Image (cartoon, helix red, strand yellow):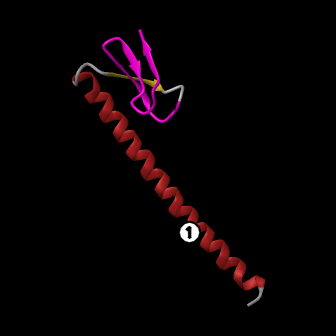
Amino acid sequence: MTSRTTEPERVRQLEADLDRVQDRIDDAERELRLLKTTVNAIAPKSAKVSMGNPCPRCDRSYLLFDHGLLYCPVCPYRLVL
């Protein structure tokens, strides 16, 4: 085969790969929205815990506020208010 015959096939394959990646990103974003909405609805009702900004130390979780303590459930970040 020459590069002329394989180039369109390669482009089609890359487009298909891109479509699959975009679908996965869309699914992940939807799941994130659902989880965030659910946590925002549940947190105030369960033990009066509130959710804040992303953790400034690890950036892997939102901070939680409970009984005057702002803390990250992932890393050791803690702040007494």
Q: So how many labels did they put on this image?
A: 1
Is residue 6 or residue 45 the one in the foreground? 45
Q: Position of residue 24 (x, y in %)?
A: 47, 56
* Residue 57 vertical placement versus 28 (above, below): above
Q: Secondary structure at mark 1?
A: helix
Is residue 41 or residue 63 the one in the foreground? 63
Q: Residues within 10 Å of mark 1 (few under 14, many from 20)?
A: few
Q: Residue pushed farthest front?
A: 76
* Residue 43 vertical placement versus 30 (above, below): above
Query: Does the stretch in magenta take in 62?
Result: yes
Query: Does the stretch in magenta take in 20?
Result: no
The residue shown at (62%, 68%) is: 14
Q: Residue pushed farthest top?
A: 81
Q: Quadrant of residue 13?
A: bottom right
Q: Position of residue 22 (x, y in %)?
A: 52, 56
The residue shown at (76%, 83%) is: 4
Quadrant of image for the C terminus: top left
Q: Which residues are magenta?
A: 58-81
* Residue 8 vertical placement versus 63 (above, below): below
The residue shown at (52%, 32%) is: 58
The residue shown at (56%, 66%) is: 17
Q: Residue pushed farthest right?
A: 3
Q: Give the left or right position of residue 26, taking residue 39 as reference.
A: right
* Residue 33 vertical placement versus 3 (above, below): above
Q: Position of residue 61 (x, y in %)?
A: 44, 33
Quadrant of image for the N terminus: bottom right
Q: Give the left or right position of residue 12, taking residue 55 as reference.
A: right
The amino acid sitting under disc 1 is Ala
Disc 1: which residue: 16
